[in-house]
Amino acid sequence: MGLFKNLFGTFSKDLAIDLGTANILVLVKGQGISINEPSVVAIQVDKHGQERVLAVGHEAKDMVGKTPGNIKAIRPMKDGVIADFQVTELMIEHFINKVHGRKMFSAPRIVICVPYGLTQVERKAVKESATNAGARSVYLIEEPMAAAIGAGLPVRDPNGNLVVDIGGGTTEIGVISLGGLVLSKSIRIAGDKLDAAITDYVKKKFNLLIGDRIAEELKIKIGTAVKLDEELRTQVRGRDQVEGILTSVDITSEHIREAMEEPLRQIAEALKSVLEEMPPDLAGDIVQNGVVLTGGGALIRGLDKYLSDFVKLPIYVAEDPLLAVAKGTGRALEELDLLQQTSFDDE
């Protein structure tokens, strides 16, 4: 089988995959981002109990919370790790086929970005998913490193740089110098926890039941980490948990700020703890260079100011923060020496 995979590899497009809890991004070597879709798979179960993939990505996400009994919309990644091995494999296979036009003979080399601090078992699960989905060889790169590369930081320099990547399942904090992670921390508090906090807040304050998708929309539309000079407002619809009737309420950016207060404080505390562990020589570099924010969470209004006030350091939002991790993973694929320097657990 290895011989066949090597042969097919000649005709395959090598891929870089940002296997996120919320979204999966796939870059094709030499072509840039080819796929950017939600990490959701819709599975249909027939009357004999047999399962088949009904939809993947955008189409599957549109089904979340709306499926009949025989269809399950599954997010196979949870808190940055594989929660459903089989469905993750199906998802990766789907996107490999999509890139290769469903050619039978494709065995690409794949670089996958994963959270810092995965266990050996979790790393193996990610690699096996990609191998079973058709990869000829699989490299893993840790998320803080990929984020730093994608944000354009000089990761190979003997200079300390600090990146905070706030994704869907995890927040990754990494201090990079001389092409390696000197210090890193991964906490399972990120976009999903912010959405859950908004759902809980709306339920408690307004007796209104809303789904995760609506909570995410509120976060994006009017979410803020600091008080705004002029509040943003929107109307949200849901079910009154007391009366049981469908109704709507007015929600402001101040409500969402209050809702997100606790998880944002935990992210700030994690950043502070990394700074407190910093070797003195690198600390001077970070004071001079500041902290770079990447990931979807970096787009929350005022988060740079909120964190800057908390840790008393300059905080900068990377250019195109949503794509930083994917771009960094792609660059590692493009530059073999960078890949060998920054990847781990490769065979």
Image: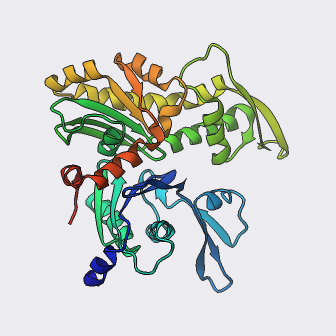
Q: How is the image coloured?
A: rainbow
Residue at 26% over, 30% down: 161
Query: Which residue is pictured at 65% across the width and 61% down the height?
Result: 59
> In terms of depth relative to the viewer, which is nearer, 206 or 233?
233
- Residue appearing at x 74%, y 39% in the figure: 208
State the image quarter where residue 311 is shown: top left
Residue 156 locus on image (x, y percent)? 19, 38
Above/below status of 124 relative to 326: below
Left or right: residue 304 versus residue 214 is left
Q: Nearer the viewer, residue 38 or 124?
A: 38
Can residue 118 be seen here? The reply is no
Query: Which image quadrant: the N terminus?
Result: bottom left
**Residue 125 % position (x, y):** 34, 66
Q: Quadrant location of residue 56?
A: bottom right
The residue drawn where x is 31% and y is 41% is: 149
234 left or right of 300?
right
**Whole-percent x and y of residue 232?**
69, 23
Q: Quadrant of residue 347?
A: bottom left
Q: Nearer the viewer, residue 62 or 326?
A: 326
